[in-house]
Image (spheres, rainbow, N blue to C red):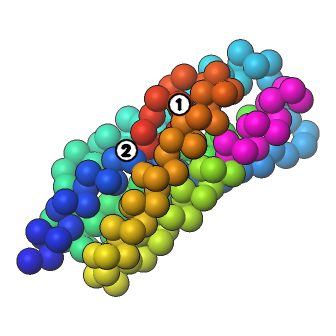
Amino acid sequence: MVRARFAWLAVPAIAITAITGGCGSGKEELSAAELRQKADAICRQEQARFDQIQAHAPANASIAADQTRELIDVSQAASSDLTDLEPPESLADAYDRYLDARDRALDQMKGGQEAAENRDSAGYAAAQTAVAKDAPERRRLAAALGMRVCAANPRSG
């Protein structure tokens, strides 16, 4: 019975995204073109990894929790890589907004993981729905920066 409750949740999980924001000092500032290229490469890797993880729908709550944990790990790694990029001053605020939106998605994913661990299918579905609901904003923010892969990625951007 748990299998049936969690199997349908794989579809909303496709919209998961992930993650953290902010740029530090001491990094070499990238041009707008370099930022787009490097960010899109990170999003491309993240998307490929998400596709591997989500190749099979979770059969039960335990597997859903494990799968969500893997997605969170991938998103955190991508977020770290994105945070390491130093945008040009003219794009810094917009880039920070994009990273903040990804951070909110990561928090929602963590809520979904906790719900799955607690066998709370309603909580898991609510977390997945929240991630999916905010995906258009993440895509809009990525598109405004010219990051095509991140903007097209329903999971990370």
38 is within the stretch colored magenta:
no
155 in relation to 5, above or below: above
Q: Tell me residue 103's x, y (percent).
A: 62, 55
In 3D space, how far apart are the residues under numbered discs 1 and 2 (Cα atoms)? 16 Å
Q: Tell me residue 73's x, y (percent).
A: 48, 56
Q: Is residue 69 visible?
A: no
Q: Callout 1 environment at 10 Å: few (<14), some (14 to 19), or many (20+)?
A: many
The answer to whether residue 27 is left or right of residue 61 is right
Q: Residue furthest left?
A: 1
97 is within the stretch colored magenta:
yes
Q: Residue furthest bottom?
A: 118
Q: What is the span of residues highlighted in magenta in the rendered image?
A: 86-99
Q: Tell me residue 74's x, y (percent).
A: 48, 50
- Mark sitting earlier along the chain (1/2): 2
Q: The N terminus lies in which quarter of the figure?
A: bottom left
- Residue shown at the point (32%, 40%) measured from the top left: 51
Q: Is residue 115 visible?
A: yes
- Residue shown at the point (14%, 76%) measured from the top left: 2
19 in relation to 112, above or below: above
In the figure, residue 95 lies in which quadrant? top right
- Residue shown at the point (68%, 46%) measured from the top left: 99
Magenta segment's dominant SS is helix
Secondary structure under tag 2 reads: helix
Q: Callout 2 environment at 10 Å: few (<14), some (14 to 19), or many (20+)?
A: many
The answer to whether residue 86 is left or right of residue 14 is right
Disc assigned to residue 50: 2
Would you name the residue on which mark 1 appears? Answer: 151
Q: Tell me residue 146's x, y (percent).
A: 64, 22
